[in-house]
Image: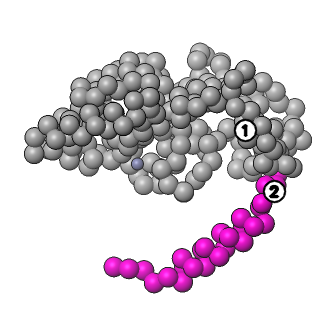
Amino acid sequence: MPAEPLAAAFVGFTELAPDGPIHIHADEQVKDVDEHVTYAGDRPVAWLLDNSDVDGRWCLVHATHLNAGEVSGLAQSGAVVGLCPTTEGNLGDGLFPFLEYLNAGGIWGVGSDSHVSVSPLEELRWLEYGQRLISRTRNIAAFDTGGSTGARLFADALAGGAEALGRPIGAIATGKRANLVVLDPEHPQLFGRSGDTLVDALIFTGNVNPVKHVLCGGRWVIRSGRHGAEDQIATANRTAMTRLIARPLKG
Ligand SMILES: [Zn+2]
C-alpha cells in the first residue's frame, strides 16, 4: 500500500492535539520495523520524522530499534523517548541505544508498557544495567568519570517525564505541582547517605521500598508507608482477581 493514507491520518491526528502531548508506540519489536518498511517504504521513526512535525509535544514509547540517523533526528526534534526497560526485558524485545542517544542530547523518561513492574526505580536500574551488560562498561549515564550515575538518571527521567506528560511537575519549584516523596532516613540501605550518593543507593540497592510518605498535588496520600484506602484497595483487588481467575479463557 502507498504511504499517502498513513500521512493523511497523521495530519488529522496532530490537529486533534495542537498543544499536545502526543504519545505513540514505535519500534517496539524488529517485526514492527520490518512490517512498516514493507507498508510505507521506510522505517517507522524515520518516516515519522519526515512526515510529521515531531517536536517537544511528542513522546515515542519504546523506540528500541533506532538506527544512527534516527537517533540524531529524534534527539534534535526535542521529542521525548519513553523507555520501558522491564517491559522490553520481559518480552525479549531488545535494548535501546541509550549511550548514543545521550551523546546526541536526546530527551528521555521511563514508564511501563505492562504491569510486570510498575517501579520507576527498577526501570532506571535496568536501563543502566542493560547498557552495561551489552557494552561491558560501567556508569553509562554518568556525566563524567566519577560522577553519579543515579543522579543523572534521576534528573533526566524527571525532566523528560514532565515534558512527556505536558504537566508542571518534575521539580520542587514555584508553579509546579507539590508532588513529593519522603524517604525513610532510617532504612538500612539509605542510612547515612545524602545527595548524589543517596540517589545512587535509592536506584541501585535492593528491592525493598524505602518510601515513607507521598504528597500528591499537595495532599498526603501515603503516610508511614500506608495509603489511606489501602485495605479497601486490597479487598477490591482480591475480588477482581478471584473473578478473573474463575472466568473461563476464551479461544
Ligand atoms: Zn508498546
Report, in whole angstroms, how far the alpha carbon at label 2 lies from the one at label 1.
16 Å
The residue drawn where x is 73% and y is 25% is 172
The residue drawn where x is 78% and y is 48% is 221
Label 2 amino acid?
Answer: Gly
Quarter location, residue 129: top right
* Residue toward you, 190 or 32: 32
Vertical arrangement, residue 1 with respect to residue 179, above or below: below
Q: Which residue is mark 2?
A: 228
Q: Is residue 126 magenta?
A: no
Mark 1 Cβ and ligand 1 under 8 Å apart: no
The residue drawn where x is 58% and y is 18% is 143
**Can you see residue 103?**
no
Q: Is residue 57 left or right of residue 170?
A: left
- What main secondary structure does the magenta stretch of the protein show? helix
* Residue toward you, 58 or 27: 58
Which percent across, then down, holds residue 30?
Answer: 29, 45
Vertical arrangement, residue 115 with respect to residue 239, above or below: above
Q: Which residue is mark 1?
A: 217
Neighbourhood count class around disc 2 (C-alpha, 10 Å): few under 14, some 14–19, many 20 upward: few
- Which label is found at residue 198? none
Q: Is residue 234 left or right of residue 225?
A: left
Neighbourhood count class around disc 1 (C-alpha, 10 Å): few under 14, some 14–19, many 20 upward: few
- Is disc 1 placed on a helix, strand or loop? loop
Label 1 amino acid?
Answer: Gly
Q: Which residues are magenta?
A: 225-251
Which percent across, then down, holds residue 169?
Answer: 64, 30
Mark 2 Cβ and ligand 1 under 8 Å apart: no
Instruction: Check the image and name the residue furthest to the right.
Output: 186
**Can you see residue 151?**
yes
Which percent across, then down, holds residue 76?
Answer: 38, 18
